[in-house]
Amino acid sequence: MKTNTLITMLVLLGCYMLKAQQLTKTEKKLVKTVAKNNSEALQFLEEVVNINSGTLNLKGVQKVGKVFKEAFDAINFKTEWIAMPEEMNRAGHLFAETSGKKGKKVLLIGHLDTVFEEDSPFQTFTMVNDSIAHAPGGNDMKGGNVIVLYALKALHENGLLGDAQVIVAFTGDEESTGSPLSVSRKDLVDAAKRSDVALGFETSTGFNYATVARRGSSGWAVEVTGKRAHSSGIFNESVGAGAIFEMSRILHQFYTEVKGEDLLTFNPGVLLGGTFLNYDTKTGKGDAFGKTNVVAQSAVVRGGLRFISEEQKERARDKMRAIVKENLPQTTAEITFKDSYPAMQPTVGNQQLLATLNQVSLDLDQGEVVAYDPGKRGAADVSFVASYVDCLDGLGTMGTGAHTPEETVNLNTFEALTKRTAVLIYRLINQY
């Protein structure tokens, strides 16, 4: 049985065993507070969306971080801006925290940056109708950040955060992670080591879905060298096959021999071949020079690899390495890998956390929440902490078109999702 199918069946079985219960008096007061603050929350969302915070706009990321910092200060969180080394060209991260020993220790994860840089024509929050707004980064993921803030604001206003440890981690480089990861994700991992559960507020895939597993991602590159010669001699013993034929062989064998495992995908994103090559790893741009009567001496391909576990990643890498070694005559090839995001596996703990969320949703008369197919989700910051704590992700805003100039955020569901988050946090910090 496929992994994602098994996940869904297990979670659905657990969900069917649950029944809606009554909210407590405290929880009813909590959701009323969320409703009271919803208009303010939407105004706050518009404010932060209208601050450009593309990953490479360091001042913009810092500016939107300052707005959130002041909001967390106002509800008695201890806040800290953690700057990254100048050579990393990343703005830094915002952390906010309350201290205590009661119940579960909760880590809430978001990110301040967006894919829309300063030169993007898509810059402002604009209402489409009474429930939908075009919003650069509003869906991915400033809306999720605002849900976190206003859920905690409601808990604070009802005096429900006393003696509870809640850490908010808003990174400033999720869309283009700073390197090395040992520096850019150190503070997030350290926070996870002091926590019991982590909730990620990346964009929701649907009102009744949450994410118990996410695939990891890795970069890979193949560089091939052939023997430069007149094309009339190709295939003979002294000239061999040339770099482009060798690269074609490698990619074809990747497709036929590595492809096939459930939730494993790999994609060659850029390919250059010819006599001379230039490729800029920072911009993703390059050019090639070659002639039809000259055997190509160089070829390069760069791609991405997605996987559901470290074991699956290593199996794929071993197969790719073996294929790259089987060179055509007079060619050599080398493959390298670069780790990016680890996998968030579908653990029992994650499924139990989903069951808690599902019970909250049922009690709010919001319907069942089930696991989303991990094969349809990209990587996210929650994956960096998945080996330390139970995790759940996809708890942010609903919308469409993330990462495109058509990105929207659904304002109709904002209040309901914030209520769900507030009650979930309340139950976790009172759970032993």
Image: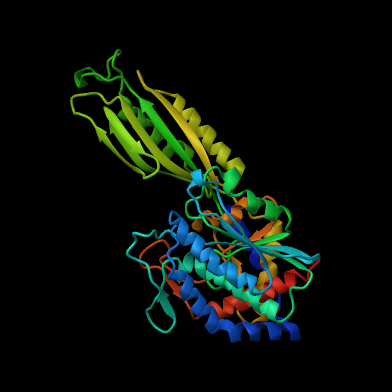
In the foreground, 198 or 240:
198
In the displayed structure image, the side of residue 383 where residue 140 appears, left or right? left
Q: Residue at x 49, y 64 (%)?
A: 63
In the foreground, 350 or 37:
37
Q: Residue at x 72, y 83 (%)?
A: 23
User: Which quadrant: the C terminus?
Assistant: bottom right
Residue situated furthest top in the rendering: 238
Looking at the picture, the colour scheme in use is rainbow
In the foreground, 156 or 312:
156
The picture places residue 94, in percent across and down from the top left corner, at 59, 60
Q: Residue at x 47, y 74 (%)?
A: 47
The picture places residue 247, in percent across and down from the top left corner, at 36, 31
The picture places residue 10, in percent across and down from the top left corner, at 66, 62
Q: Tell me: residue 232, above or below residue 81.
A: above
Q: Tell me: residue 176, above or below residue 128.
A: above
The picture places residue 301, in percent across and down from the top left corner, at 38, 37
Q: Tell me: residue 311, above or below residue 12.
A: above
Residue 310, quarter of picture: top right
- Residue 3 in view in this figure: yes
- Residue 1 in view in this figure: no
In the displayed structure image, the side of residue 421 where residue 276 appears, left or right? left
